[in-house]
Amino acid sequence: MNTRWNVAPGAGGSRDNGPPGRRLGVKRACRSRRVEWHSKPMNVVITGAAGRLGRETMRTLLDAGHVVQGLDAVEACPPAPGPVRVCNLLESAALADQWRGVDAVVHLANHPTSYGCDARTVFNENVMMNFNVAESARLAGVTRLIFSSSVQVMRAERFAGDGTSSRLLRLPLDGDYPASPANPYALSKAFGEDQLRYFAANHGMTAIALRFPALFHQVPVIAGNEPHPSVPLDEGLTWLTYADAARCIRQALVAPLAGYHCYFPASARPWLRVPVETIRQRYFSNVPVTGETPLASLVDLRSLAAELDWAPQDD
């Protein structure tokens, strides 16, 4: 069965062009061994390349001088910026020859939601796709895997119209926030993060999970002074442009990392047109705050700046 894979519905910056570590003074080391920024063009495969984030990422990586090819369950129409091959990621045999000479895989392909869908199909097929991609890439000698996870891994099913208190454990949000999936799609993404930990710990891969929030081409059209009743509040009113998400992926490709890492790339400001402290008091008054108050942002981007030299450009 060929399923249209796309990035989940829901993090580059003005300082992320060129040799990143020199400008921020980032120590060129990682959690397990010393590595260097990749300075040469890489051979990269993007899954889900016919989708919106896949196209933007392909364009960004090509502009950075990398050699990029795409995989998707459907043909790219209109054409993507680079070549896209039709491939069913549920069929492991179809992946055996997709990674020859490849340095890194950017895995964006998954069912994008479980709302209105069969929960078993979404969960089982996402988990199978994720493992098939990682295992076949490992067997082919690929050393770096970037995975599109989701903000939904972190949040409860609390919507603006519910009138209930937040179930977040703390603010601000970041990539170290513990996974607490509350729907089948989020559960499949949490399993994907665990799979990355497995491949990093047992097979020496550099595995990076990016928990993308809702993605937009520009400042969200939903921006206003009050959230719609259907808005999932415990996503922290977070958002990101496709361009910033693609720039974050570009930085994750070349950053001096080893082992497993998880980040939450998001705009520093919420899409609600209300001061951050007002938002906290109105919607998250029961949530503990780590660090200084009042909050300047509902997200903590320091690890992204220090380790990927990334900050959002499109705030």
Image: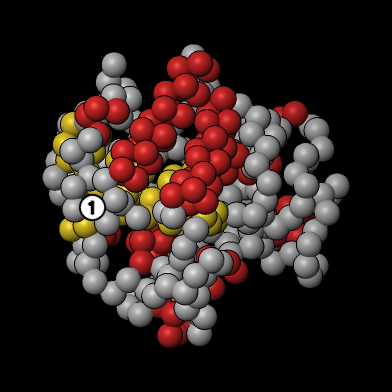
Q: Which image quadrant is residue 161 in?
A: top right
Q: Amino acid at mark 1?
A: Val
The picture places residue 313, in percent across and down from the top left corner, at 44, 66
Note whether residue 55 is visible.
no
The picture places residue 257, in percent across and down from the top left corner, at 46, 66
| Residue, far front | 202
- Residue at 47% x, 74% y is 34
What colour scheme was applied to this rendering of the protein? secondary structure
In the rendered structure, the answer to whether residue 3 lies left or right of residue 171 reads left
- Residue at 47% x, 78% y is 28
Q: Nearer the viewer, residue 237 or 226?
A: 237
The picture places residue 21, in percent across and down from the top left corner, at 44, 80
The picture places residue 81, in percent across and down from the top left corner, at 17, 50
User: Is label 1 in a helix, a strand or a loop?
Assistant: loop
- Residue at 53% x, 56% y is 261
What residue sits right under mark 1 in the picture? 102
Q: Nearer the viewer, residue 286 or 54?
A: 54
Note whether residue 75 is visible.
yes
Q: Residues within 10 Å of mark 1 (few under 14, many from 20)?
A: many
Q: Which image quadrant is residue 95 in?
A: top left
- Picture mark count: 1
Q: Quadrant of the N terminus?
A: top left
